[in-house]
Amino acid sequence: MPNKDSDRIVRFYEVQQIPPGPSIWVPLVQATLITQAGGRINLPLLFDTGASITTLRAEFYSILGLQSWDQGERASTATAGGTTDAYKYMATLEIFDKTITCPILLNNQFPFNPLYMGVLGRETVFNEFGFWENIHELYVTGNP
Amino acid sequence: MKYSIKSLQDIGEVKANLRATLTSAKSPEETLEMFDRIGLEPFVTEEDDLLVRIWAVAAEDFVPREEAAIIRAKRATSEKSDDLDWLGKNLAVVRGQYASEWIAVHEGEVIDHAPALPELLGRISEFDRPLITFIPAEPVTWTFTYAQ
């Protein structure tokens, strides 16, 4: 019997489509990205258990202190449009009240969506937490 | 320590503790800090009054757990997710005003916008953890979604 104690909830957000269509429910989290200058900004990320590495839009390279988005270790990532190049870096995120330094990918082919600037991946981040799912909510524990 | 109210009767005890906090603090700022520390949400009104938010259990097992999740998703909450919630509900209006721009959302409003991310971040450093996102002019791509 798995332990389903949880202390956090990942909400599914109801979004009205443009143009109007059926409601879409998306599991979103706000992760705080610590910038190179020490500032903190919140980024909406899609909670995607299928993603291996947390991926952000390429435009965030500048706040990580990089000169360009594609100067890191080259990697491939799968998107809806096929496999594209991505570049790997280390970044510090605050999520579910934990501060985690983890690998992230920057990708310049990330789909346009104002409700998520990236996806929260399994590697490192998911090692820190346990999850179980209910209707329209994901339950999170910091002690998996 | 955070207050945990198990019944409506406990509210009387909480109110007594609040009065003690009010009399022991040396300044209004210290009072607000003390309330913040114990997990209450203080708010100073335009009429100079101090309000605090107290949640109490009014009914246990009010709805089935599955239904509770849907209700929470549809109603505004006081959690940190407010800015994202606000954005989701006002997406059409925001997109009409800020298409092709980066925006910063803080406490339920767009506090600044710019065509380039560094320009935006350079102007909002005084805000704590604003929500940053890009509003595309192109049709929104709904990939990796859970459709109802």
Image (cartoon, coloured by chain):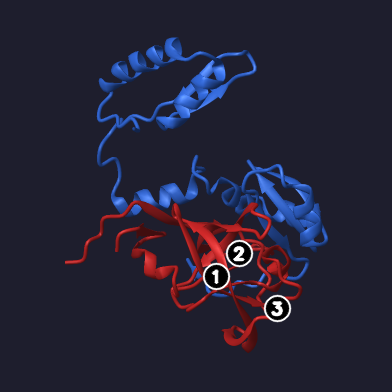
Under circle 2, the secondary element is loop
**Residue of label 1:** A119
Reading the image, the residue beneath label 2 is: A116
**In the rendering, what colour is chain B?**
blue
Chain seen in red: A
Alpha carbon distance from label 1 to label 3: 13 Å
Amino acid carrying mark 3 in the image? Asn
Residue count near mark 3 (Cα–Cα under 10 Å), binned few <14, some 14–19, many ≥20: some
* Crowd rating for badge 1 (residues with CA inside 10 Å; few <14, some 14–19, many 20+): many
Q: Position of residue B142 (x, y in %)?
A: 60, 71
- Per the image, the residue denoted by label 3 is A108
Residue at image position (52%, 46%) is B80
Amino acid residing under circle 2: Tyr
Q: Position of residue B56 (x, y in %)?
A: 34, 29
Pick whichever, A98 or B78, lies toward us: A98
Residue at 48 percent across and 62 percent down: it is: A100
Q: Quadrant of the C terminus of chain A?
A: bottom left
For this orientation, the residue located farthest to the left is: A1
Where residue A107 appears, as percent x and y from the top left, is 66, 78
**Residue under the point 34% across and 13% down:** B16
User: Nearer the N terminus, badge 1 or badge 3?
Assistant: 3
Which of labels 3 and 2 is toward the front? Answer: 3
